[in-house]
Image: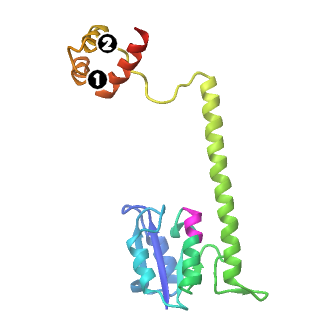
């Protein structure tokens, strides 16, 4: 049996391109499972329904590998479940090397697809690390130029010391002090820790 798997990240996104690709490969709409959910993990209703339906020898079509998921470690894990445990074939329409049905010079498509996935996973990991490195370098350069990150600190009101002394002498609570200064309880608490160190 041939099944299709279609995924978009939100309900507002359009599935037409993926559905057209499925129909072009002869898939019936009743055999296409659709998820409108994030690809961060595989806890998706449509995907789980498809898993329950699968039998050895079935074929699953997806438009591109990112429709299966976003996390390559989890993609590889699910790929193994599908090809080794469920014993089904996978076809990534936009990437012919990820087609477990094909044999190239006697080498099985499953073996080739496994290798390709491992390489793609490695490249994705390196790209994530490089992106993080570039972000950190950019932040350091910005800090050198005097750019400050995070929330702008709130200026202490003119009557801060008066309220602080009331709290210190036990006449008001932290919550009452925050209320009198029209600030959050956590901000007043933080200010008082600094105040106690300076007095």
- Judge whether 190 appears above or below 10 on screen: above
| Residue 36 in the image, given as x and y percentages of width and height | 39, 66
Judging from the image, what secondary structure is the residue with disc 1 in? loop
First in residue order: circle 1 vs circle 2: 2
Above or below, comparing residue 153 to residue 4 in the picture: above
- Check whether the beta carbons of the residues at disc 1 and disc 2 lie within 8 A of each other: yes
Q: Quadrant of residue 102?
A: bottom right
Q: Residue at x 68, y 59 (%)?
A: 123
Of the 4 image quadrants, the one containing the C terminus is top left
SS for tag 2? loop
What residue is shown with label 2? 157
Q: Which residue is mark 1?
A: 183
The x and y percentages for residue 181 are: 26, 17
- Asked whether 186 or 52 is in front, the reply is 186
Bounds of the magenta segment: 71-76
In magenta segment, residue 55: no
Lateral position of residue 67 relative to residue 102, left or right: left
């Amino acid at each position: 049996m041939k099944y299709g798997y279609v995924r978009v990240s939100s309900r507002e996104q359009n599935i037409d391109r993926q559905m057209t690709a499925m129909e072009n490969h002869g898939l019936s709409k009743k055999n296409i499972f659709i998820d409108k959910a994030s690809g961060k993990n595989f806890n998706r209703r449509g995907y789980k329904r498809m898993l329950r339906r699968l039998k050895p020898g079935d074929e699953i079509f997806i438009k591109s590998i990112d429709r299966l998921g976003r996390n390559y470690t989890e993609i590889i894990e699910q790929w193994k479940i599908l090809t080794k445990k469920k014993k089904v074939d996978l076809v990534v329409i936009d990437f012919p090397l990820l087609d477990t049905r094909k044999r190239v010079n006697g080498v099985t498509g499953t073996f080739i697809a496994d290798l390709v996935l491992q390489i793609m996973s490695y490249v994705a990991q390196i790209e994530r690390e490089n992106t993080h490195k570039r972000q950190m370098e950019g932040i350091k350069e910005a800090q050198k130029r005097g750019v400050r990150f995070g929330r702008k600190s709130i200026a202490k009101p003119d009557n801060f010391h008066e309220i602080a002394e009331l709290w210190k002498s036990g006449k008001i609570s932290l919550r009452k002090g925050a209320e009198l200064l029209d600030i959050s309880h956590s901000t007043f608490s933080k200010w008082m820790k600094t105040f106690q160190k300076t007095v």
